[in-house]
Amino acid sequence: MITVVYFAWLRERIGTGREQIETQAETVAQLVAELSSIDSYHAAAFADLRAVRVAVDQVLTDFDAPLAAAKEVAFFPPMTGG
């Protein structure tokens, strides 16, 4: 079981800020594919991965990152300064 956390417009599109997922995904990319297949809201949120950043157990990473012992994956839009 893994906790998936959504921030900003991802949370708005999916309709929740957090969910528990039972997954066999080995990488973040595989997890995204599974999430996208849940419903049209998830699919819309992950339609353009150039606009999505990811952290595994609160460490920024990329979509090829392994999920081996991960407890949490967070998705959020790119951060801007200012």
Image (spheres, rainbow, N blue to C red):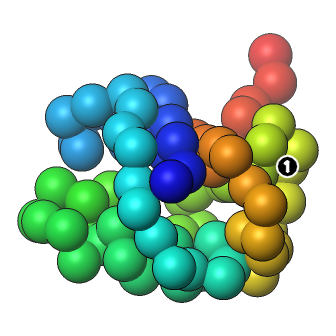
Residue extending furthest toward the left:
40
Give the residue at x 78% y 71%: 68
Q: Which residue is mark 1?
A: 60
Give the residue at x 78% y 61%: 69
Q: Residues within 10 Å of mark 1 (few under 14, many from 20)?
A: few
Query: Could you say where residue 9 lies in the image, as x and y percent from the top left?
Result: 37, 35
Can residue 55 be seen here? The reply is: no
> Which of 9 and 30 lies nearest the eye of the viewer?
30
Q: How many marks?
A: 1
Give the residue at x 24% y 44%: 14
Query: Could you say where residue 49 lies in the image, as x and y percent from the top left?
Result: 53, 70
Residue extending furthest toward the top:
82
Query: Could you say where residue 63 lies in the image, as x and y percent from the top left?
Result: 70, 74
Give the residue at x 11% y 65%: 40
Q: Quadrant of residue 66?
A: bottom right
Query: Could you say where residue 79 lies in the image, as x and y percent from the top left?
Result: 72, 35
> Which of 52 and 22 lies nearest the eye of the viewer?
22
> Which of 40 and 24 lies nearest the eye of the viewer?
24
Under circle 1, the secondary element is strand
Quadrant where the C terminus sits is top right
Tell me: residue 73, above or below residue 63: above
Tell me: residue 37, above or below residue 45: below
Can residue 28 be seen here? The reply is: yes
Q: The residue under label 1 is which amino acid type?
A: Leu
